[in-house]
Image (cartoon, rainbow, N blue to C red):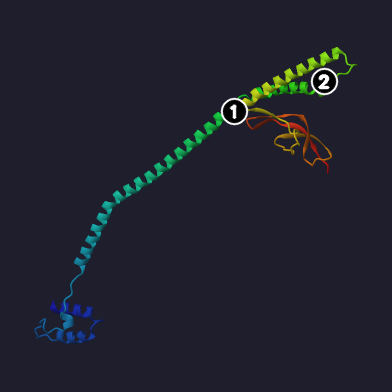
Amino acid sequence: MIRRTLLRHAQTVKQIHPVCISRSASILHTPSRRISSSSLPACISRRYYSAAPEAAASTDSAQASSEAQGEEDPVKKELDSKNREIIDLKDRYLRSVADFRNLQERTKRDVQSARDFAIQKFATDLLESIDNLDRALTTVPASKLAPQSSDPDTSADENTYNKDLANLYDGLKMTETILMGTLKKHGLERFDPSEGEGQLFNPNLHEATFQTKVEGKEDGQVFMTQQKGFTLNGRVLRAAKVGVVKNS
């Protein structure tokens, strides 16, 4: 058995120590000689130990570390889950606050709009009556309202008639002034683009019914108003019908 063992060792170290192989072969072929460990070459007498215990120890440590890591994983997963839940809840909270503020703003605007334009239909129906009152005042010529001169050919009946007409005109004018003042308190206002020097045509406020040449005025300027316009709290209730200058 010793020879077999030595042969196996010799075959193992054949490629590494060729000199040792020759010496061990000479020893193996000596039958009557007692072989001792001291007579063997150093390369053969060397003992080899298995690394299995070290590998087992490293495997055990790896398993222990993996088990420790496995014990920490649930805590980390739960922490990550809670963090994601917090982020999601914060996002929902901010969105809810933004939606509520937008709802407040929309409600406020709707309430204000309903308050400002609650009389829109009533004001629209009232415009025709205001137009008729204005036409009645404009049909009276200014010469009929002035006091008559001391002309011997003028009769007393004519002087009395003119005075009554002037009183009627004044009464209608005061009625119009009070009516327009009351409507202005509720946001209804009347505008005349031809008053003063005349305004430039604005399609948002004016409706052009015709164009013509007018000396001394520039193109696009309003020179005549056929029907006055109205606004209700800044919104055009009815555009003014006007004549526009076009010299070119």
Residue 125 in view in this figure: no
Q: Residue at x 52, y 35 (%)?
A: 105
* Residue 116: mark in rendering: 1
Amino acid residing under circle 2:
Lys
Residue 192: x and y in percent read 73, 31
* Marks 1 and 2, how far apart at CA: 42 Å
Can you say which quadrant of the picture contains the C terminus? top right
In this picture, residue 2 sits left or right of residue 55: left
In this picture, residue 211 sits left or right of residue 122: right
Q: Nearer the viewer, mark 1 or mark 2?
A: 2
Image quadrant in which you'd find residue 28? bottom left
Residue 70 in view in this figure: yes
Residue 129: x and y in percent read 72, 21
Q: Residue at x 76, y 16 (%)?
A: 167
Can you say which quadrant of the picture contains the N terminus? bottom left
Q: Nearer the viewer, residue 178 or 112?
A: 178
Residue 173: x and y in percent read 73, 21
* Residue 146: mark in rendering: none
Q: Residue at x 75, y 21 (%)?
A: 132
Vertical position of residue 67 compared to residue 98: above or below: below
In this picture, residue 4 sits left or right of residue 184: left
Q: Nearer the viewer, residue 60 or 132?
A: 132
Q: Are marks 1 and 2 in contact (CB under 8 Å)?
A: no
* Residue 144: mark in rendering: 2
Amino acid residing under circle 1:
Asp
